[in-house]
Amino acid sequence: MKNDYALKNFPPPDRIMEFFTRKTLPAYRPVNGHIHTPFSFSAFGSVDAVFTAAREENISVLGINDFYVTDGYDDFYRGCLKNGIFPLFNIEFIGLIKNFQEAGIRVNDPNNPGRIYFCGKGLDYPFHLESGLKAELDAVKEKTQEQLRKMVGKLNLLISKAGPGLSLQFDEIRSRFAKGLVRERHLAKALRVLAEENFRNPEERTTFIETLYGGKKSKVSTGSPAALENEIRANLLKAGGAAFVEEDESTFLQPLKIRQIIADAGGIPCYPVLLDDSSGNFTEFEGDFPKLAEELERMQTNIIELIPGRNDKKILEKFTEFFYDAGFTVTFGTEHNTPEMEPLTVKARGKADLSGNLKEITWKGACVIAAHQYLRAMGETGFVSSDKPDIVQRSRFEELGKNVIEYYLKEYYENRT
């Protein structure tokens, strides 16, 4: 393949469909449509580490899905080309529905009424955005960084009492632990590393951490980095914590603006579903499946995504089959935006294997996005979300996308020999 975007060099759709007419293709391939990279926050220390794991697990399709940024697209694309993995170019935003917030309606954030996570799938590559929308997005990103700077200031007040002479520097956190955009989890990681580097004795380290907690006992071992970072974040950085700084409303994009950004960047609007928690509870927005489908149709969003690792397998199956039968495209991912390193292979809660039906549905979802990216690269109209899912369109994109992915993989393996 050439070094520029491979899909631009593919044959036209009719020829792509002819390539595999006499060949038996697999019913599905291993897919992970949603991972975060170090360009927002990731369990992976580098983009290269993502592909080491993907090769070991035979992942065929992988979707980058960082918060607010597409800075990782180039590294991700090069890694996909090098390793024979089809790339999906995605992005994630956090928005706010004000009237839901006032009414106490939780959407897909279990702790913050009105807050909504929303994704764009299959963005154009290279990434582009109209200057006015880019300025608005940049302004929101800068607002998030202002909040994080204030949190570092609050952390340093605590640190100065627990470890005189020690402190955190925002710019150092950004250069050492982040790749541009600093997030809460980077602060937790930086604080954990500060403790490790300055208190070699585990007991002294624990004393330092507990002093930051205001005397509250730590429940995790300082030898468990991921668990400690999660505890630091929960005790100090979340609402009620001594270093918490509430987000300004200007930090959040309005859902309509998010959709405008996604559309201008060539992507498809996608609602990421939270679904059930460990106690079997749902948010007010998601608890009634038919009603949720109607709400998504009003939002002209025909693609949904789940992170099955947090869901009960039976509930996941019931939900996925309901929405797929209703005409929605469904994708799965793992996120990997916490410190814990988990496999890239998608499983349900408790590491339960997905059924063949679920694997086929998420494969078809990846095929829809692949077909969209391919058609956009060819200068044609991609997948169109409307106020009613179009099953005919979905079927056409599933079939085309399957052939696009298979052609991509064929090119990779032929060029290796």
Image (cartoon, helix red, strand yellow):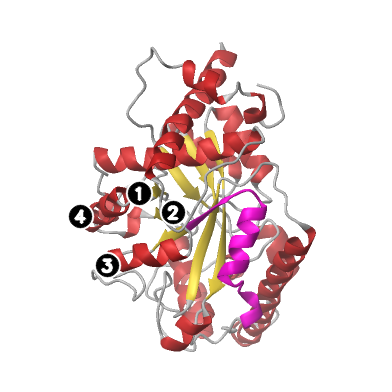
Residue picked out by circle 3: 278
Residue picked out by circle 4: 314
Distance from Cα at disc 3 to Cα at disc 2: 27 Å
Q: Which mark is residue 327?
A: 1
Disc 4 secondary structure class: helix
**Is 343 located above or below residue 120 in the figure?**
above
Front disc: 2 or 4: 2
> Badge 4 local density, few (<14 within 10 Å), some, or many (20+)?
few
Distance from Cα at disc 1 to Cα at disc 2: 8 Å
Foreground residue, 244 or 331?
Answer: 331
Percent position (x, y) of residue 350?
26, 54
Residue drawn at x 42%, y 44% as measured from the top left: 344
Disc 2 secondary structure class: loop
In the image, what residue type sits under mark 1?
A: Gly
Disc 1 secondary structure class: loop
Q: Which mark is residue 104?
A: none
**Is 115 located above or below residue 267 in the figure?**
below
Distance from Cα at disc 2 to Cα at disc 4: 23 Å
